[in-house]
Amino acid sequence: MPVFDYRFTVPASLEAVRDFHRDTSALKTLTPPPTIVQLHAIEPMAEGSVSRFTLWVGPLPLKWTAVHRHVTDHGFTDIQAEGPAAKWEHTHTFTPLAEQLTEIHEHIEYAHKRGFWGVVTRLLFSWPNLWFMFGYRCWITRRKLRSSRRSGGPA
């Protein structure tokens, strides 16, 4: 089963990183263009909360239902309950390194379906595409949290 890990630091407190990821619009913020996120039902982050959305990759809709587990101040796991992959478990871990420095560790365990959706996920979740996606997430997270610190409020 494929595994993907990505770590980066942000110049922000654990609380700011946690709050940024708990915002119900975070998925839209963290998804790199040209993918478009259509949110259908996003429950506030809590143990067992559910998010339903569609990722539009060009004309291709990837309908997704994620359930949140292991929700703490130090992260959470979103598990695909329905969607294009055979398995998708994405764990976000937040580790404070200093008062204004937090490491974010993204860990994904996933598997592909057979047939058409297997081909799609093999292309979309290839190592280069995941590296690009999480490189973007690193950049946008740092940018949003930096601007939040300057303005004294949420990004």
Image (cartoon, rainbow, N blue to C red):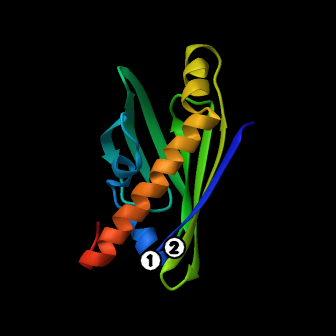
Q: Position of residue 137 (x, y in %)?
A: 46, 52
Q: Quadrant of residue 53?
A: top left
Q: Residue at x 47, y 81 (%)?
A: 100
Q: Nearer the viewer, mark 2 or mark 1?
A: 1
Distance from Cα at disc 2 to Cα at disc 1: 7 Å
Q: Confirm whether residue 71 shows in the render.
A: no
What type is the residue that disc 1 sits on? Glu
Q: Quadrant of residue 23?
A: bottom left
State the residue lying farthest toward the bottom: 99
Q: Is residue 135 left or right of residue 152?
A: right
Locate the C terminus by quadrant.
bottom left
- Residue drawn at (42%, 64%) of the image: 142
User: In the current view of this chain or complex, which residue is farthest to the top?
Assistant: 115
Report x, y in % for residue 74.
Answer: 56, 71
Residue 99 position (above or below residue 1): below
Residue sitting at 70 percent across and 43 percent down? 3
User: Left or right: where does residue 102 sit relative to residue 51?
Assistant: right
Above or below, 137 against 46 in this view is above
Q: Are marks 2 and 1 in contact (CB under 8 Å)?
A: yes
**Element under disc 1:** helix
Mark found first going from the N terminus, 2 or 1: 1
The disc placed on residue 73 is 2
Residue at label 1? 15
Residue 56, percent from left and from top? 37, 29
- State the mark number for residue 91: none
Q: Amino acid at mark 2?
A: Asp
